[in-house]
Each structure stands twice: as structure tokens, then as C-alpha cells.
Image (tube, rainbow, N blue to C red):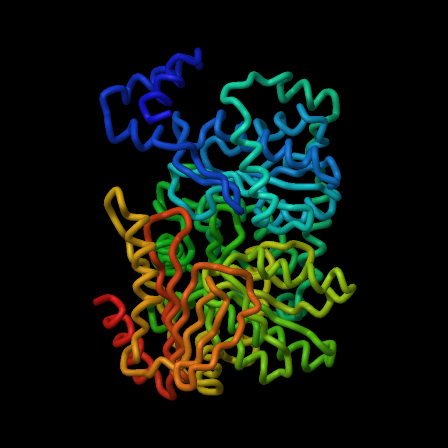
Amino acid sequence: MNYMDRYEFWCNAGLPEDVQKELQSIANNEEELKGRFGSDLQFGTAGMRGIMGAGSNRLNRYTVRRAAQGMAAWLSESDLPKIAAIGYDSRHNSQLFAEICAVAFAESGILTYLYDRLAPTPMLSFAVRRLGCGCGIVISASHNSGEYNGVKCYGPDGCQMTDEPAAIVTQRIAAIPYFVPEKKSFREFMDEGLIRYIGQDIWEEYYQTVLAESVGPEMLRSTDLNVVYTPLCGTGNEPVREVLGRLNVNMHIVACQEKPDGDFKTCEYPNPETDAALNESYKVADKVSCDVILGTDPDCDRVAIAVPCNGEYIKLSGNELGCLLLDYILKARTSRGDISDGAITVRSIVSSPLADRIAEAYGVTMKAVLTGFKYIGGEILELENKGQENKFIFGFEESCGYLKGTYARDKDAVVASMLVCELAAYLKKQGKSILDALRELYETYGQFLAKVQSIELTGADAMEKAANMMANLRKQVPESIGGAKVTAVRDYKIRVEKDMITGEERPISLPSSNVLEFILGNSGSVIARPSGTEPKVKFYYTAVANTKAAAQALLDAMVQQMSS
């Protein structure tokens, strides 16, 4: 089918009046027709994400139902438990889409547990494991703007779905017709017991599990810590406040971002990585006593912080916060002497290698894995299969994702928020700030500066341009970047590292991924990674020097060269 064939098919499907009106409104809009019907919305390892609206390439009750039917078909033919768990965030249609997924599972005889209210993504990961599920779904588009929503899919280990099962689900979806009527309503399946709400007991178990990951709860109970917190109109409002409240943290909530709001009117792009995400928090912090500002994204799997400094606010990067938390946890556990032999910490390959130096200083192994928290979860699973999950200490990604503990297999902003407050309280007792601790890290291990650059490509051949950019980087390896010599190249696609000095090649043990890394000796690195779903290539820069000025000069030169 071409896009007009798909459009006509939808127009003639006898859909509800509101959908028909939406379809009629774009009848003469070529751009909208191609955008909505040029293809089917793709299902990948993380599920699918898209703009909401009518159309085969949009997220709506019909595309969501097909995705859930495909998941149900895969689960039904597997050896996994025929049990599923579902959660959802604050976006428009999230609860509706969650209920549609629950019905699709129930139609296949799958016992389905559904959160009865907004719940963070890590709580879904926790529920999958706690309830012995074969799979799970979160309805969320994470940090995207309000017109987006998504279906995030999880396996029985609580990790996001991996390539092999995702490929099977994709095949099953392709074989399912659109607009297959539901056999029974959501309420009827509830009455029969095939769909059940997740009870408050699971919420409490989650809270107790998170609180057990505290490094020093006495720090918070004995320190007058003042926090400004924004849930960015998302799911963090209840669990973050509950956990911090139990630890006696004084919280000032950003009122205009406290309640769920699918439009995100006060934060158009609710991504804690961006500086603008905390703008409303700064206004509140100006009026109250504040030691640290916390902001969690709509599905509360990521957190960002800012710290007051001379009348302004300094927002830390995901790398900086990850390294601070790592150092705090390792320092506390070292002082207690409870780090077991063979203990590991984990970071993504695009996260700061400063973390490696910190881990090494405490005698702990740092493992680098591909981008995506499922790979950090995979390291935990490997330990779990050996009965050694207690050897996992901490994992993080530069995109503001952190996890301490093995109760979930995705990043968790609830536990991270608690650890941030502990760190702040620990430092406050010493008359220090988080910025003081960051300066001490740099003085101890060297200046590590990082920057992420996203090259957006346009035009009908934009994805092809992205592929060509990666191909050209492989063909024309620069001798130096920003004045620093390229000493090695890691091509994760062919899983080979080449020493540019000796010509020696070594295998890379990680799975194949279209990622290219240029190593600049001890001066840093540049990593290039295309998006799998959008026409852009991301560059991750790390510059290392003895002084901040030298690191900044190198970083600027690196970015300028790679941008030209």
C-alpha cells in the first residue's frame, strides 16, 4: 500500500465519528497524509514511540492495540509465565492506552496487573519481577514533548525488551489486521479477574526496597536539608515525596509542575538534561531556603539537579552527578568495609571515563556497556544468574539515569533522588556543598569536560545522510582531533579496536552496534552514534586535562573540528 491507499483504508473502516473528522481534516494536506500514512509506526527493542493522532504512523488506540496483541501473541507461544504488568504516566491517553493493552493481553488469557494510578517506569520494572511476569509495558514517551506517547516493553527480568524477542513481536504485529474488535470490555475482564489492579502492598514493598538502598539514612534524619523538587507534571510527585518525606527532607514543591499535565505547559520539553527544564524551580528556590534542586522527568526514571551558587544556580550534567553519587557510595561502603571481592560498577560507553578512575581508586571494577539501560540491567542479570547480584554497586548513563540496587532493571529517579539528598546532607554536615565535592573530584582525578552534540539532518534522504556520515567517518579517520592525536579507533559495528600507532587490532566483546569511538590517548575521546529512529547523529566529546581551562580549550577545538 502507498500512503493514499492506507488513508483510504482508514477512511472506509467505519471508525468512530471523532476519528473520521480528524481524517477528513487532513484530506487535502499532502504533508500530513504522507507523515501519518507513509508507513506503519515501527516497533523496536524499546517498543514504539510517536506523535499521537489518527494514522498508521501515529500512536492511537489502533496502533497501540496491535502492538499489545503482538506482545500477547509472543508471550502466549513462549515458555514464560502468562502474566503481564502495565504502568502508565501523565501524558494524554496514557491511561486509555494502558487499559487497551490490558484488554489485548486478557483476550489471550494472560493474567494482567495494572497500576491503578500514575506510576514511574522503575516501579513497572519492579512489579514485573515481584509479580513473576513474563513481560511488562509502560505507556510513556519519557521526556518527549506533549504530542508524543509511547509503548515501552519489558521482559521477564524487568529489563527493556532485547533484540530477539522484539523481532518476534514485530513479526506478530505485522500479521495482525487493524481494527479487530475487542472481545470484551476492560470492565468485563476486571470483573472476571483476568485484569487486576496492582495493590498498595506493592507500592509499599517498592518504598521499603528503595529505602533499604540508603547509604546513610541517619544523615538525612539529623540534617536540616532543604530541597526544591519538581516532578515536571509527571509520575514522580507521589513516590519521590513519599520516600523523601519518610527521611525528614524539607521539600518545597514547584506548584505549577506538581500535578499531572499532558501538555507540559510550564515546561514544553520536559527533559531534565536541558537547562530550561528547571527554570520554574529556580523561581521557587529564589523565595525559600534551598540546598539542592531536584527535577524528575515525566516517567520518573531520570533526575537532574542544580545547586545554588552566589545568587545563581549551577545545573550539573548527568556525568557529573553520576560520578558524585558513585564516589559517595564507594566512600561510604569502603568505610564500612562491606564491598565484596569482584564488586562491579557499570556505565554506558558514552558516559564519562572519570567514573573509571573513581572506581579504580576504590579497587572496584568499572564495566562499560552499550548505550541503553537494558545493558546495565544485563550485567545485573549475569551476576544474578551466578547468585552474585549483591556485587552490583551502581550503574549510570550520562543522560541522567542512575540505579543503585537490583530490585529494578531500569534507571530509577526515586532512588537517585534519595541518594542526592543523602549526599547533600553528608556534605552540609561538613560545611561543604555539592559543588565543593565536584571540585574535589576534579582536583583528585583531573579535569573531565564533556559535551553532547546532535547533528540534525533534513530532507527525504535524511536517514541516508546519517548513514553516509557514519560511513565517511569510518573511511576517513582523522589523524588528530582538536590537536590531540587519535591513538585508537573502536568500531563497535564490526567489534574491532585498532591501535593507530602499531596497527594492532583487538576484538571488542560488546554486541555489535553502529557506534564509532576515536580515542585521543589520555586526552579524551569522541564517540559518534546515529539515532535508530530519527535523522540525526550524536557526537559525545570528552576532554581531559590538568586544568579546567586546558580541558575547555581542547573540548572547544574538538567540537569545532568535528562540526566543520
Whether residue 129 is situated above or below residue 74 in the rendered picture: below
Q: Which of 10 and 232 is in front in this view?
A: 10
496 lies left or right of 392: left
Whether residue 274 is situated above or below residue 368 in the rendered picture: above
Q: Which residue lies furthest to the left in this view?
A: 564
Q: Is residue 497 visible?
A: yes
Residue at 44% over, 14% down: 15
83 lies left or right of 459: right
Residue at 37% over, 78% down: 543
- The image shows residue 334 at horizontal and vertical percentages of 68, 81
- The image shows residue 50 at horizontal and vertical percentages of 41, 38
Residue at 64% over, 37% down: 115
Whether residue 531 is situated above or below residue 128 in the rendered picture: below
- The image shows residue 501 at horizontal and vertical percentages of 40, 85
Q: Nearer the viewer, residue 490 or 60?
A: 490
Numbered disc total: 0
Choose top left, top right, bottom left or bottom right for residue 19. top left
